[in-house]
C-alpha cells in the first residue's frame, strides 16, 4: 500500500504530488487522460493573480495571495518561465471607478502589495495602446504571467523524478474504504493507498461522490480564448483585465510568457463537462471586448482559438477539506493556478492533521531543467551541445525553431508525452504561426521512431485521435 | 568541428531557400559569371514544395512541355548539380542582418554565419492554418491544411482520412480533392467563402468537375464536430457580407477537413532584418530588380508574392539572380525613383517601385472577378497604355509590360505609375 493516491494530474494535482513527495510520502498520480495538464490547466488565462479579487477571509483570498508570493521562486526552481508583468483592471465609467476602489480596499485587506488607482494619462504612459474609452485603472504590480501546462508538467515531472508514479489513462471508477486506507479502481486496475487527494477538476464532485461524499457539486464554466501571433505579443506589457460589472467579469488581454497575445475568456455555465468547443458567439464577444480594452489588435493574426472549462464549486469558495484521510481539492476555479503551490502546502497540512507522517525526503531534488533550456543558451553553449548531439541543430518546427534534439529529449523526459499535442505542449513544436502545418508529419515520424510504434498509431491527443487512417492504396 | 567559436563562412551570393525560386536565381547568377554562390535549404533535398506536387501541369511556359512538380524541380536541381553550385540542405537560416550576415544552423556546422556580398530571399510561403479562420467547435484530429495532407499522401505514403470536406478552393485544395479521390477517399464538397474560386480555372475543371466533386461557392464551414477524430462539419451559405446564413446550415459527416484558404509568404526573416513589407502581398517591397529596401538583399518567388505558376517564379528568380550579380560587381545603378501604384481593382503590383529606365514587366492581381475591362497604365492624368481583357480573376496573376518610354514619361511628369482597370 502506498501512502497517497492523487487523482488528477492538473496543475493542482501536480503541485500536491510534488509537495507530498518532498515530504517523503510514496505516491501515485492517477490521470484519466493520456497526458497530464489536459483539463482546465491546459486552457486558461495563464495569469498569476495578485489577489485583490477574492473576498477577504475566503480560502481563495488566503491561498491566492500566498501562492502569488510563492510562485516566482517555485517556478524558478522548476525551471518554468515566469514574468511579473503587472496587471491593470481597466474601467470605462464612474461606476467602474467605484468598483475599482472597492477592489483596491479588498486587495489591501487581502495583503496585496503596491495597488494603486491610475488616471487615463498615467495608464497611457505605461500602456499607449489602451482603448480610447478607458478612463481609470487599478494597477497591481505583483500580477504575473506563467505557462500553466508548463508548470503542471514540471511539477508532475519533478515528482516522478523523485519517486512518484504516474498512471495515465486511469479513470477512477470506484473508491472503497479499506483497512487503513482506500482502494481506488479503474475498470482494469486497483491502487491501494492510505490517503487519497481528489484533484479531479470538473469531475472532483463525481470523484468525491464515489467515496460517499456528496456535500458539493462542481459545474463546468466555458471560457473561450483566442491566441495571437508573437508579432502581436508586445501590444501591451501588462495584463489588461476589464472591470467586473453586472455583465460579469469580462475578458482580459495579456501577453503570454512565450510572447503571444491571449484574449479571453468568456464565461458560460454548461452541462457537458467534455464540451470544449468554441462558439461563434463566444469568439465574437472576445473580439468585441478585447477591442474596447486595447487598440490595434490585429485579429487576422489569430493562430488558434480554444475553450477551457473552469471548475465552479457550489460553495463559491475553493472546497478543500479532509475526512478520514480523503482530501478534496474541488471547485478550484480562478485563482486556482495562482494558488496551486499554496494549495499543495495546505493539503500537506491537512494530511498531517489526518495522521500522515511527514518528514522531508533526504534526497529530494526540487530543481528541474527548464523545458526550453536549449533556447536560453548562448551560441557557443548551443554549439557545444550540437557537437555532442547534432540533432540539436536539425530544426523540425520552423516557426518556433524547435530542433529534433529538443523533441527527442522531451519524449524521454518525465512526464513523457505519447502524442503530437503532448510534444507540442512540451517543446512548442507546432505551437507557432503555421500550427504544425510543416512540422507535424516529421513529429509523427519522430514519435513513431522513439516510441517504437507504427506511423499510423500516432495520435494527435490520445484516444482515437489518429493522425492518419492508413497507408495510401489501402483505404 | 571547432566547438569553441562560431564558424564564419563567406560567399558572394547567399540564397535562402533551394526551391524553384532559389535554384533558378542561382542558375541565373551562375550564368552571369558568379561562382561563389551558396544555397541554404531547410529541407533534406533541393526542390521545395514542388517535391510533393506530383501532379502535372508545370513548365508549359518555361520548358514548353508539361512536367510534374518533382520533374520541374529536378530540371533545376540537375543544373545546380552539374554547374557545381554549392548548396547545403537540412540547413535553417535563423537571421539575416542588414549588413548581409546570414546566421544559419545545421548538423554539420552547428550554428554558423555566412557573410554575403548579396542575399536572395527565396523562402516560399506557408498555408493559412485553421486557427486563423476562427471556426467554432472542437479541435479533433483530422483537420489539416491541404499542403500537409499532400505531404502525408505524396511524401510519406499515408492517408490522413477517408471522407473529406475541403474548405477553400485554392489550387492546393483543388489538387488534393483529386488526389484524395484517386487514393480512394470520398471528397464530399469543396466550400469556398467567396462567390468565385481562388484557384486556376483548369484546376476546377480537371480536379473537381472531372470527378463530380461539388464546388459550393459562397459557402463556409461554420462548426467542427468530433472529440478525438473529426466526425463532421456544419457548412452554410454566406450572405454578401460573408456572414453565414443559419437557415442554410447543413451537417456533413466526414473524418477529414482540408483547408486551402490562402498562402502567406514566409517573411519572418525579412521582417526581422527590418525590410519594408507590402501590406497586400505580405512580401517585401521591391524594385524592378527585385531588390528590397536593404541594398544587396533581393527577393523572388512565393516569398515575394504568391504565384500561381512556377514558370513565373523561375522567371522572376532569374531577374533577381542577374540583378544580384550586378550588385556584387558594383554595377547596380539606381537612377530614378518612380512608384508603381494600383487603383484598388488592381490589388497589388510587383515590383512596387522602379529605379531604372528599362523595359519592365509588371505582375499584378485583381481584387474581384472583372469582365471586359481595359488594363490601364497612367501617370497622373496621362494614359500611357491600355489593353483589353475579357476576364480577370483574383486567382490568375496578370502582367503588363512597361516600356522605357512609358517609364521615362512618368519620370518626366514626376508622377507615380498607376495600374488600373477601366
Image (spheres, coloured by chain):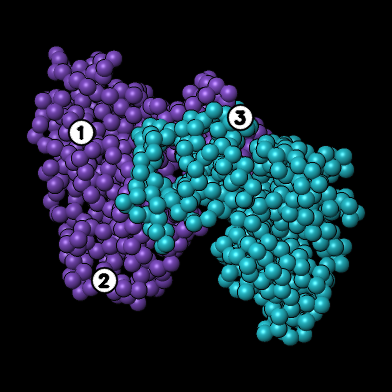
Chain colours: A purple, B cyan
| Chain holding disc 1 | A
Mark 2, residue position: A92
The quarter of the displayed image where residue A240 is located? bottom left
Q: Nearer the viewer, residue B104 or A348?
A: B104
| Chain holding disc 3 | B
The quarter of the displayed image where residue A122 is located? bottom left
Mark 3, residue position: B156
Residue B206 seen: yes
Establish whether labels 3 and 1 are both on one chain.
no
Residues tagged 3 and 1 counted as in contact (Cβ below 8 A): no
Mark 1, residue position: A204
| Crowd rating for badge 2 (residues with CA inside 10 Å; few <14, some 14–19, many 20+) | some
Residue B414 in the image, given as x and y percentages of width and height? 72, 84
Residue A74 in the image, given as x and y percentages of width and height? 35, 43
Q: Nearer the viewer, residue A444 or B279?
A: B279
Quadrant of the snapshot with the N terminus of chain A? top left
Residue A427 in the image, given as x and y percentages of width and height? 49, 39
| Crowd rating for badge 1 (residues with CA inside 10 Å; few <14, some 14–19, many 20+) | many
Amino acid at each position: 500500500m502506498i501512502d497517497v493516491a492523487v487523482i488528477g494530474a492538473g496543475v493542482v494535482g501536480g503541485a500536491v504530488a510534488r509537495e507530498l513527495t518532498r515530504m517523503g510520502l510514496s505516491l501515485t498520480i492517477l490521470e484519466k487522460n493520456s497526458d497530464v495538464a489536459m483539463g482546465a490547466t491546459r486552457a486558461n488565462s495563464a495569469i498569476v493573480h495578485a489577489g485583490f479579487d477574492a473576498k477577504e477571509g475566503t480560502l481563495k483570498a488566503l491561498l491566492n495571495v500566498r501562492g502569488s508570493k510563492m510562485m516566482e521562486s517555485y517556478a524558478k526552481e522548476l525551471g518554468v518561465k515566469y514574468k511579473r508583468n503587472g496587471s491593470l483592471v481597466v474601467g470605462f465609467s464612474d461606476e467602474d471607478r467605484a468598483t475599482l476602489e472597492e477592489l483596491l480596499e479588498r486587495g489591501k485587506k487581502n495583503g496585496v502589495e503596491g495597488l494603486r488607482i491610475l488616471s487615463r494619462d498615467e495608464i497611457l504612459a505605461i500602456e499607449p495602446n489602451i482603448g480610447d474609452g478607458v478612463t481609470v485603472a487599478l494597477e497591481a504590480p505583483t500580477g504575473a504571467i506563467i505557462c500553466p501546462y508548463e508548470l503542471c508538467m514540471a511539477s508532475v515531472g519533478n515528482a516522478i523524478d523523485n519517486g512518484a508514479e504516474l498512471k495515465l489513462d486511469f479513470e477512477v471508477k470506484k473508491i472503497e474504504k479499506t483497512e487503513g486506507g482506500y482502494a481506488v479502481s479503474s475498470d482494469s486496475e486497483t491502487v491501494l493507498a492510505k490517503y487519497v487527494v481528489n484533484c479531479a477538476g470538473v469531475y472532483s464532485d463525481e470523484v468525491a461522490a464515489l467515496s460517499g461524499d456528496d456535500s458539493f457539486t462542481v459545474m463546468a464554466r466555458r471560457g473561450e480564448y483566442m491566441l495571437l501571433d508573437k508579432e502581436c505579443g508586445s501590444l501591451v506589457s501588462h495584463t489588461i483585465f476589464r472591470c467586473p460589472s453586472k455583465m460579469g467579469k469580462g475578458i482580459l488581454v495579456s501577453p503570454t510568457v512565450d510572447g503571444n497575445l491571449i484574449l479571453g475568456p468568456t464565461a458560460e455555465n454548461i452541462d457537458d463537462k467534455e464540451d470544449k468547443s468554441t462558439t461563434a458567439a463566444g469568439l465574437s464577444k472576445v473580439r468585441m471586448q478585447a477591442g474596447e480594452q486595447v487598440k490595434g489588435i490585429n485579429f487576422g493574426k489569430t493562430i488558434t482559438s480554444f475553450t477551457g472549462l473552469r471548475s465552479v464549486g457550489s460553495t463559491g469558495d475553493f472546497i478543500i477539506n479532509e475526512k478520514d484521510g480523503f482530501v478534496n481539492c474541488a471547485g478550484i476555479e480562478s485563482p486556482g493556478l495562482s494558488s496551486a503551490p499554496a494549495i499543495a502546502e495546505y493539503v500537506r497540512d491537512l494530511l498531517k492533521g489526518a495522521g500522515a507522517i511527514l518528514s522531508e525526503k533526504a534526497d529530494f531534488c526540487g530543481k528541474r531543467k527548464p523545458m526550453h533550456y536549449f533556447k536560453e543558451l548562448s551560441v557557443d553553449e548551443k554549439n557545444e551541445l550540437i557537437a555532442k548531439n547534432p540533432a540539436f541543430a536539425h530544426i523540425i518546427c520552423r516557426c518556433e525553431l524547435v530542433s529534433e534534439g529538443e523533441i527527442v529529449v522531451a519524449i524521454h523526459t518525465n512526464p513523457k508525452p505519447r502524442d503530437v499535442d503532448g510534444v507540442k505542449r512540451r517543446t512548442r513544436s507546432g505551437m507557432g504561426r503555421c500550427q504544425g502545418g510543416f512540422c507535424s508529419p516529421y513529429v509523427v515520424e519522430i514519435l513513431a521512431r522513439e516510441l517504437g510504434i507504427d506511423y499510423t498509431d500516432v495520435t494527435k491527443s490520445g484516444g482515437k485521435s489518429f493522425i492518419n487512417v492508413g497507408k495510401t492504396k489501402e483505404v | 568541428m571547432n566547438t569553441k567559436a562560431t564558424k564564419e563562412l563567406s560567399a558572394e551570393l547567399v540564397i535562402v531557400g533551394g526551391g524553384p525560386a532559389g535554384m533558378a536565381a542561382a542558375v541565373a547568377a551562375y550564368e552571369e559569371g558568379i561562382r561563389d554562390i551558396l544555397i541554404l535549404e531547410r529541407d533534406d533535398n533541393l526542390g521545395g514544395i514542388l517535391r510533393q506536387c506530383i501532379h502535372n501541369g508545370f513548365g508549359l511556359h518555361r520548358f514548353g512541355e508539361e512536367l510534374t512538380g518533382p520533374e520541374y524541380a529536378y530540371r533545376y536541381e540537375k543544373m545546380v548539380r552539374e554547374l557545381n553550385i554549392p548548396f547545403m540542405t537540412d540547413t535553417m537560416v535563423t537571421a539575416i542582418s542588414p549588413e548581409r550576415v546570414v546566421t544559419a544552423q545545421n548538423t554539420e556546422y552547428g550554428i554558423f554565419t555566412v557573410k554575403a556580398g548579396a542575399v536572395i530571399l527565396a523562402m516560399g510561403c506557408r498555408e493559412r492554418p485553421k486557427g486563423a479562420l476562427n471556426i467554432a467547435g472542437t479541435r479533433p484530429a483530422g483537420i489539416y491544411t491541404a499542403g500537409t495532407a499532400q505531404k502525408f499522401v505524396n511524401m510519406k505514403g499515408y492517408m490522413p482520412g477517408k471522407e473529406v470536406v475541403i474548405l477553400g478552393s485554392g489550387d492546393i485544395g483543388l489538387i488534393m480533392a483529386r488526389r484524395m479521390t484517386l487514393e480512394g477517399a470520398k471528397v464530399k464538397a469543396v466550400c469556398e467563402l467567396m462567390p468565385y474560386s481562388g484557384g486556376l480555372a483548369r484546376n476546377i475543371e480537371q480536379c473537381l468537375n472531372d470527378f463530380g466533386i461539388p464546388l459550393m461557392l459562397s459557402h463556409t464551414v461554420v462548426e467542427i464536430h468530433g472529440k478525438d477524430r473529426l466526425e463532421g462539419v456544419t457548412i452554410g451559405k454566406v450572405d454578401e457580407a460573408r456572414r453565414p446564413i443559419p437557415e442554410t446550415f447543413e451537417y456533413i459527416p466526414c473524418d477529414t477537413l482540408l483547408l486551402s484558404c490562402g498562402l502567406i509568404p514566409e517573411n519572418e526573416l525579412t521582417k526581422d532584418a527590418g525590410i519594408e513589407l507590402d501590406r497586400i502581398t505580405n512580401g517585401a517591397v521591391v524594385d524592378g530588380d527585385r531588390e528590397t529596401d536593404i541594398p544587396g538583399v533581393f527577393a523572388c518567388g512565393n516569398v515575394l508574392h504568391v504565384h500561381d505558376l512556377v514558370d513565373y517564379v523561375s522567371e522572376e528568380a532569374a531577374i533577381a539572380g542577374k540583378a544580384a550579380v550586378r550588385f556584387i560587381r558594383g554595377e547596380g545603378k539606381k537612377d530614378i525613383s518612380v512608384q508603381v501604384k494600383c487603383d484598388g481593382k488592381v490589388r497589388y503590383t510587383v515590383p512596387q517601385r522602379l529605379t531604372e529606365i528599362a523595359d519592365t514587366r509588371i505582375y499584378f492581381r485583381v481584387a474581384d472577378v472583372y469582365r471586359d475591362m481595359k488594363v490601364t497604365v497612367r501617370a497622373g492624368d496621362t494614359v500611357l497604355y491600355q489593353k483589353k481583357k475579357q476576364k480577370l480573376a483574383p486567382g490568375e496573376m496578370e502582367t503588363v509590360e512597361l516600356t522605357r518610354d512609358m517609364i521615362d514619361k512618368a519620370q518626366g511628369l514626376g508622377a507615380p505609375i498607376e495600374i488600373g482597370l477601366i
